[in-house]
Image (spheres, rainbow, N blue to C red):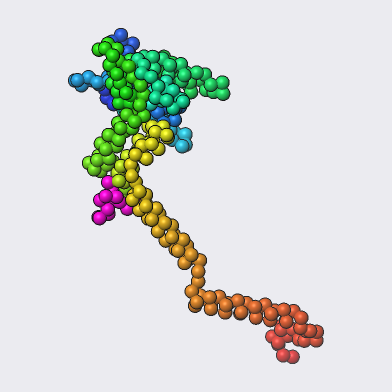
């Protein structure tokens, strides 16, 4: 029996999981965990598709992450119930377009050519074959990517809809639609996402982004243009957690951050210079302090010379100090 885990997840998912645990036949087919390549690293990671309760119903996908404490911990749930595993599972929504990136790239020609238009199921089948190949150096079964999970991803309506945001599309007939992965089209979609997430009202609702912009000195008056560029770059950095490094580099190159980079470099250089100056001033001594140190050294030298002279003096025949304190006879 598997040990229980503590998790944070949308309330809509609870009904799906409860149905699964009760073995109800009404449980949606999409309500099972999928092991898919992470869009940034390609490492096998867990995701959970689900359908919202509210109308109109929509299907979404959650990324499953485990937050584990550094030291061994456990959960106390009351009534003497303890969960030995102290980690917490956090399930947060993820854009299906991100999940499509490693799959589309696996089915795309590696020679740099545009490739040909193909039905989506053909692309997913090829990607499933490529990504599920067993690495002879991989000994951990949980690191493998099941082809059935990749193929199941294609059955989700939100994924089929997301294909149009990362691919060129041709409709041969109403029943036959073909696709081809397009890096420019994907970049265009990411730019739209940056514009939406980088809007002032969105960034001001994120403490993480606000703290970053404030630390860079972009929240001060008179730096509105730099602040606007700072929001864009901060948003790109946020998206970098969900896109491959090459696509992230291409996304950054599509913006002109020349002024922002120059400002940040100047601010960094000034901060570094101030730190070095402060450290140097602590190590340096004033003229008065140097004179005091010289006097101390001279006194110490004279004292040591006097001790040496006393050691060399001939004291034979001299009365001892104690003789001066004897009673007179």
Which of the 4 quarters of the picture holds residue 2? top left
Residue, x 44% and y 30% (percent of image)? 41
Q: Toward the viewer: 269 or 115?
A: 115
Q: Position of residue 158 (x, y in %)?
A: 29, 21
Q: Is 327 drawn above or below residue 91 in the view shown?
A: below
Q: Position of residue 112 (x, y in %)?
A: 44, 27
Q: Which residues are magenta?
A: 216-228
Locate residue 48: give its quadrant.
top left
Q: Nearer the viewer, residue 17 or 118?
A: 118
Q: Quadrant of the N terminus?
A: top left
74 horizontally vs 307: left or right: left
Decide if residue 318 is on the left or right side of residue 89: right
**Quarter of the image with the C terminus in it:** bottom right
Whole-percent x, y for residue 313 in the image: 76, 83
What is the residue that sits farthest to the bottom in this orientation? 329
> Could you say which quadrant of the image residue 5 lies in?
top left
Q: How many marks?
A: 0
Is residue 222 inside the magenta stretch?
yes
Q: Position of residue 199 (x, y in %)?
A: 24, 40
Kindly identify the residue that appears in the image at 33 percent across and 41 percent down.
255
Residue at point 29%, 44% (across, down): 231
Position of 28 relative to 283 (above/below) = above
Please tell me which residue lies in front, 169 or 62.
169
Q: Is residue 39 magenta?
A: no
Q: Is residue 301 left or right of residue 287?
A: right
Instruction: Name the chief secondary structure element in magenta.
Output: loop
> Quick check: can you spot residue 305?
yes
């Amino acid at each position: 029996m598997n040990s229980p885990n503590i998790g944070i997840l949308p309330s809509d998912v609870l009904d799906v999981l409860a149905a699964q645990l009760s073995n109800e036949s009404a449980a949606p087919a999409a309500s099972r965990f999928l092991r898919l390549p992470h869009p940034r690293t390609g490492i096998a990671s867990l995701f959970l598709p689900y359908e919202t309760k509210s109308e109109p119903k929509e299907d979404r996908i959650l990324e499953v992450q485990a937050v584990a404490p550094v030291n061994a911990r456990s959960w106390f749930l009351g009534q003497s119930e303890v969960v030995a595993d102290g980690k917490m599972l956090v399930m947060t929504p993820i854009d299906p377009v991100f999940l499509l990136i490693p799959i589309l790239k696996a089915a795309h020609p590696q020679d740099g050519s545009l490739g040909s238009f193909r039905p989506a199921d053909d692309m997913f089948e090829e990607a499933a074959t490529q990504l599920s190949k067993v690495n002879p150096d991989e000994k951990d079964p949980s690191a493998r990517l099941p082809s059935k999970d990749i193929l199941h991803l294609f059955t989700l309506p939100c994924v089929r809809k997301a294909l149009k945001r990362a691919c060129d599309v041709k409709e041969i007939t109403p029943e036959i639609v073909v696709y081809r992965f397009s890096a420019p089209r994907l970049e265009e979609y990411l730019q739209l996402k940056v514009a939406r997430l980088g809007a002032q009202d969105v960034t001001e609702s994120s403490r993480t982004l606000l703290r970053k912009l404030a630390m860079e000195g972009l929240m001060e008056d008179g730096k509105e243009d730099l602040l606007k560029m700072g929001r864009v770059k901060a948003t790109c950095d946020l998206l970098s957690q969900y896109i491959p490094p090459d696509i992230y580099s291409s996304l950054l190159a599509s913006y002109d951050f020349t002024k922002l980079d120059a400002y940040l470099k100047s601010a960094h250089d000034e901060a570094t210079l101030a730190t070095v100056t402060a450290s140097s001033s602590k190590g340096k001594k004033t003229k008065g302090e140097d004179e005091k140190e010289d006097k101390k050294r001279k006194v110490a030298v004279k004292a040591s010379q006097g001790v040496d002279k006393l050691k060399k003096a001939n004291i034979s025949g001299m009365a001892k100090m104690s003789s001066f304190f004897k009673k007179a006879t």
